[in-house]
């Protein structure tokens, strides 16, 4: 069997990189464990035991903590920003792209425990896995020490992104791009947009657009097709975020 390249045995060094020392290091070990590795350690069909080893439940917690801390940071940093600007900045900061970039800076991929198949396919360098382990490590810190420690970690890990985000840049962000990035991170197919109805006189058209993806669908209406698609993408992101809470 090919020897794993994981540096999980050097967790003391990783704690220095994270700027956090765990009281319960088993939380960090679980955060760094991908489901592919966990399933190799248990008897076939023992899904329950595997779930206790891998980090998917921690990702769920980390996603919620991240959203809360980033929303609080943006609210305090930009008191005059509109709800739309705050939402766009938040979506950009918590996107898989931003999380994977931060994860790479922290070298989390080098410590990730993955199964043989994932190892051979370069799993520890995949954007989705890097984003997931980032959320899992955040959750581990939250469970180990609470919200203050988790907040400090987010400021440490996402410092570059937090400093560079601003309402003007957020206004230029495309909700359709953000939605596509989110779905790609979840290994889902490209979202589909369709004009299902056009109402009103020729000089005052209203376009009704339906957006569908693997996990659901939403509808939106605006005066132009582009605006309707953008609004639908925004609603889809809100729906996806709400489902994860």
Image (cartoon, rainbow, N blue to C red):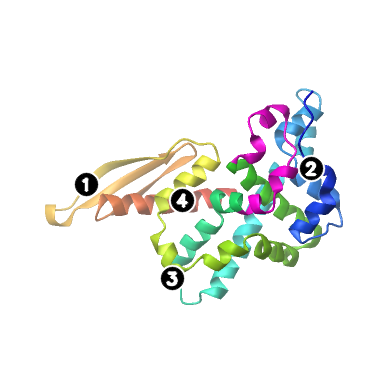
> Considering the numbered disc 1 on the image, is that residue within a helix, a strand or a loop?
strand
Q: Estimate the spatial distance between the alpha carbons at disc 1 and disc 3, rounded to whole Å.
A: 30 Å
Instruction: Give percent across and percent down for residue 201.
Output: 13, 53
Q: Mark 4 near mark 3, Cβ–Cβ under 8 Å? A: no
Number of the front mark, 1 or 4: 4
Q: CA distance from mark 3 to mark 2?
A: 44 Å
Q: Earlier in the sequence, mark 3 or mark 2?
A: 2
Give the CA distance from mark 1 to mark 4: 26 Å
Q: Residue at x 38, y 43 (%)?
A: 211
Which quadrant would the N terminus be assigned to in this image? top right
The percent position of residue 231, horizontal first and vertical second, equals 37, 54
Q: Secondary structure at mark 2?
A: loop
Which span of residues is magenta-colored? 102-126
Within 10 Å of the Cα at label 1, are there few (<14), some (14-19), or many (20+) other Cα atoms?
A: some
Which circle, 2 or 1, is nearer the viewer?
2
**Residue nearest the observer in this picture, 80 or 165:** 165
In the image, taking residue 13 as reference, residue 177 lies left or right, namely left
Q: Quadrant of residue 204?
A: bottom left
Q: Which numbered tag is attached to residue 7?
A: 2
Residue denoted by label 3 = 82
Question: On screen, 126 above or below 44?
Answer: below
In this view, 115 is above or below 151: above
Q: Is residue 125 magenta?
A: yes
- Disc 1 marks which residue? 198
The quarter holding residue 169 reads: bottom left
Which label sits in the foreground, 1 or 3? Answer: 3
């Amino acid at each position: 069997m090919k020897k794993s390249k994981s540096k999980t045995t050097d967790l003391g060094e990783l704690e220095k990189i994270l700027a956090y020392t765990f009281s319960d290091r088993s939380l960090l070990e679980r955060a760094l464990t991908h489901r592919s590795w966990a399933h190799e350690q248990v008897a076939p069909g023992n899904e329950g035991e595997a779930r206790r080893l891998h980090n998917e439940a921690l990702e769920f917690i980390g996603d919620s903590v991240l959203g809360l801390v980033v929303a609080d940071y943006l609210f305090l940093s930009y008191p005059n920003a509109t709800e739309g600007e705050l939402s766009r900045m938040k979506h950009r900061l918590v996107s898989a792209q931003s999380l994977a970039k931060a994860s790479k800076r922290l070298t989390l991929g080098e410590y990730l425990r993955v199964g043989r198949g994932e190892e051979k396919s370069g799993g520890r360098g995949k954007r989705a896995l890097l984003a997931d382990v980032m959320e899992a490590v955040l959750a581990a810190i939250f469970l180990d020490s609470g919200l203050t420690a988790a907040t400090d970690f987010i400021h440490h890990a996402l410092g570059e992104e937090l400093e560079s985000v601003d309402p003007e840049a957020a206004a230029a962000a495309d909700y359709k791009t953000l939605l596509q990035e989110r779905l790609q991170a979840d290994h889902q197919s490209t979202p589909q947009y369709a004009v299902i109805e056009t109402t009103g006189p020729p000089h005052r058209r209203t376009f009704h657009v339906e957006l569908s993806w693997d996990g659901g669908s939403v509808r939106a209406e605006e005066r132009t097709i582009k605006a309707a698609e953008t609004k639908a993408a925004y609603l889809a992101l809100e729906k996806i975020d709400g489902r994860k809470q």
